[in-house]
Amino acid sequence: MVDKVSSSSSSTTNLSVSSTSTPVCTTIKVAVIGTGLAGLVAAYRLASFSSDSVKFELHLFDERPTIGFDASSVTVADSNGVERRIDVPMRSFAEGYYNRVIDLYRSLGLKFHNAKFSYSFSEITNVDKNERGAETYFIHGGQKGLFKRSGRPYSQGRIRYLFNLICIVFWYTYFSLVAAFSRPKGGLSFENEEKLEYSRRARYWYLDNPDEAEQRASRMFKKGHAYGSMDTGDDEDEANIGKRVETMQDYVARWHFPGWFVDKFMTPLFCAMSTCTVDAIMDAPAADIIDYKRTTFMKPHYLLSNNSVSAATALTSPLDPENIHLGVAVKGMLSEGSAWTIRTSDRDYNHFAHVILATPPSVSKELHPPLQRVFKDVKSESVSVLVHTDNRVLDYMNSKDVRDLNLILTEERTESTHVLFPGIYQTTSPQALRSSPDQPPSDDFGGRIDPSKVVSETKFERVVRSPELVHAIEKMRKRQGRQNVWVAGSWMWQGLVLLEGCVTSADYVAERIKAKSGGCTISSRDMV
């Protein structure tokens, strides 16, 4: 629980000015709370910046004993005795949507490779009639393996498989065409280049004149072209936000997608990718999902070749190791006039000119109470990820049906099991398929995962993408920099809650701090 700390009126300076003669260089201290990708990128951008007049001294804080971006990763031996480093959670990124992530990794000299995932789709069956508890109904070979690793599920007859395949191909083609040419209400416009240019600028928030941009956005919204919603500051506007952003549920109804296609193909993929519930996906802004579908169509998915540790090492390289405070729980922020003190359980760290909150909304609003009203309607879910060596987790499948990623539809969410290496599995949202519906899940998930074979169990907070979050981000965009407090994170941009949001929001915060400190100005060329 985060302790609340009251403000102080003392006037401690936040700038340390060098005593050397011309040119005078001002050192500005910046605190970054949270060492996920957003916090690391913001710190890296500022620490790497230098000019004749300004340089930044970065301090990282995290309650975990290691850098947060790699804190949950583990090393485990596969069935052949070879030690493997496993990222938790799996962090894949697709070309076309993760443009800033890819540019960042390339600039850091990091290597990544095409994952070429293959997929299996299964659903829960009547456990009284099927001891496995689930049945595989479709297999997809993935990129460049469409025919090699696709095939007829073991439990399907040829006629049924052929009929299903024809239906799936038809509706998937329809979905691709709709995603390419439609514009969800309250979402991005793809048809007009001028509107697309503005959408990019709005998404990355590089705005030379926020007031003028807001007026333009409001005019576009009245014409039906604005992305998301605009905060007018009145309660009625907040109450109507859900009517102004088309959800995925409304979108599939408007375009008459059949329920079986939505339930068995669209929803499982996005549930697994976003690690959230079925309800969260169907309540999400349709623009998020359609934008992802459109931009990643026929594009490769990548994984870092040297895991997340390589990114964490590169991003912290410009920082002074003494300023990386790990295993330090931040209890509050104390205002000292124009500066901030970061209060931890052990000591106070003083004289910070800026504070960057790269933490979940639940933590950010406790550390900085003025954010409580902004994030009051933002919701999150708890997600569990297991790395284990128990092959019983896939016993519901015939061994010939097992692929790289194996998705199981349950009533509330999608379980995904990634076969990482021989004998090593990563299961997200594990379910007890054989348990009675009226009994709580057992520690071994219905006999599917032996607790003694679990290498690690990680639970993390997943912010739910919703019309209310769209509205909160628009409100936060206006608050960014007040009292020199900034917020960054995967959820702090208008798109799916993924790594791209970490880099985009962190870049925005770093550029704004530099501009506010006189270190640089943001040109119109940087806006897109």
Image (cartoon, rainbow, N blue to C red):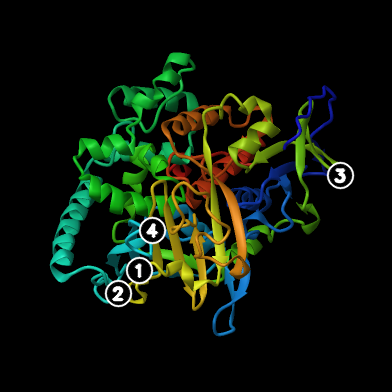
Q: Which residue is mark 1?
A: 118
Q: Around disc 3, counting alpha carbons within 10 Å, would you say few (fewer than 14), some (14 to 19), or many (20 or more)?
A: few
**Which of pointers 2 and 3 lies earlier in the amino acid sequence?**
2
Residue count near mark 1 (Cα–Cα under 10 Å), binned few <14, some 14–19, many ≥20: many
| Residue at horizontal 40 percent and vertical 65 percent from the top | 405
Would you name the residue on which mark 2 appears?
149
Q: Decide: is 235 above or below 186.
A: above
The residue closer to the viewer here, 124 or 514, is 124
Q: Secondary structure at mark 4?
A: strand
Q: Nearer the viewer, mark 2 or mark 3?
A: 2
Residue type at numbered disc 3 = Asp
Amino acid under disc 2: Arg
Q: CA distance from mark 2 to mark 3?
A: 55 Å
Residue that carries the numbered disc 3 in the rendered image: 346
- Quadrant where the C terminus lies? top left
Question: Residue type at mark 1?
Answer: Ser
Q: Residue at x 56, y 65 (%)?
A: 387
Residue matched to label 4: 408
Eyeballing the image, is 441 above or below 131? Answer: above
Question: Which residue is at 43% across, 45% downward?
Answer: 277
The residue lying toward the viewer, choosing from 164 and 349, is 164
Query: Could you tell me which residue is drawn at 55 percent across and 72 percent down?
Result: 389
Q: CA distance from mark 2 to mark 1?
A: 7 Å
For the residues bearing labels 3 and 4, Cβ distance under 8 angstroms: no
Work out whether residue 8 can be spotted: yes
Under circle 3, the secondary element is loop
User: Quadrant of the rendered structure where residue 68 is?
Assistant: bottom right
Q: From this viewpoint, which residue is outermost toward the front?
A: 128
Relative image position of residue 118 (x, y in whole percent): 35, 68
Residue 274: percent from the left, percent from the top?
44, 50
**Distance CA(mark 1)–CA(mark 4):** 14 Å
